Amino acid sequence: MPDIFAKLGEVKQLAIFPLPLVLLPNEFLPLHIFEDRYREMLTNVGGKNGTFGVSLFDPESNLGDRPEPGTVGCAAEIREIETLDDGRSNIVTLGTMRYRLIDYVDVGTSYFTADVAFFADEADEDGRDEETLADDVFALFQRIADAAFKMSGNRGRLPAITRGSPEQLSFLVGAAFNFDNELKYELLAMTSTATRLERIKAILSQMVSQMEESADIHARSRTNGHSKKKLDI
């Protein structure tokens, strides 16, 4: 992601948008902006192509009013923006670089701003083959996607993803499934592509057999009563 590093590498502060979700790099996130403070944020970050930080925050499970320093988030770049007549906005953002929230700073705005440190995956010192792991994960994803389509047609279709680099793939697959916040945060905070791919591979390996078995049962049930061959039920 050299272009992203070139754009954000020197950035030291970000507007922070606390949300009860985890955004991953390469993941699209549509948002409806209606609160006054986030309307202000949208204006100040520059509208389209502007960037702000998305940090996980669930008011029901946190004692404070904002994500804690030391937590990890993901920068969101605004890709589309629709401004409504009453001042609200619909935007589509794309997760780019990960950051660690250092501390909050008062810059005189109604929304939170924080000092951040961006980070990327580190070189794997254990010599694990990231390309082979990526091939395995991509193959498992395709098998699960095929099974989901067999069961539900277009309603069950998973997002189409490309193989890409191992790091890109690890985040694309993580974003394609409805993983809970705890798991997505774990994937976001990891600094090893190989470790992230191994974690995802283990999860998909548990899913794939059950998905394919369910797809086969669904396919057989659809032929019941429509085939001249007697079915053993």
Image (cartoon, grey):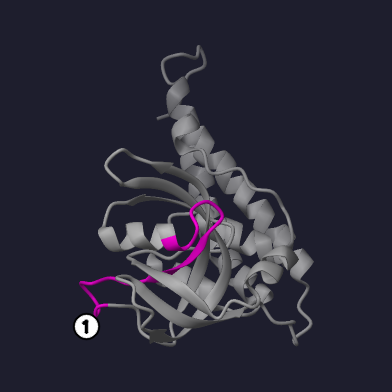
Where the C terminus falls, by quadrant?
top left
Residue under numbered circle 1: 63
Q: Residue 95 versus residue 151: which sits nearer the camera?
A: 95
Across and down, in percent, residue 122 comes to 70, 82
> Residue drawn at (46%, 13%), measured in percent from left and top?
226
User: Tag 1, which secondary structure?
Assistant: loop
Residue 166 vertical position relative to residue 121 in the rendered view, above or below: above
Is residue 40 visible to the viewer in this orientation of the structure?
Answer: yes
**What kind of residue is marked 1?**
Leu
Figure quadrant of residue 218? top left
In magenta segment, residue 52:
yes
Q: Residue 191 versus residue 155: which sits nearer the camera?
A: 191
Q: Residue 173 versus residue 27: which sits nearer the camera?
A: 27
Across and down, in percent, residue 153 comes to 49, 30
Across and down, in percent, residue 149 comes to 52, 35
Main SS class of the magenta portion in the image: loop
Across and down, in percent, residue 190 comes to 57, 78
> Residue drawn at (30%, 38%), measured in percent from left and top?
85
Residue 156 vertical position relative to residue 174 in the rendered view, above or below: above
Relative placement, left or right, of 103 versus 38 is right
The region drawn magenta spans: 44-65
Is residue 216 visible to the viewer in this orientation of the structure?
Answer: no
> Residue drawn at (23%, 72%), measured in percent from left and top?
59
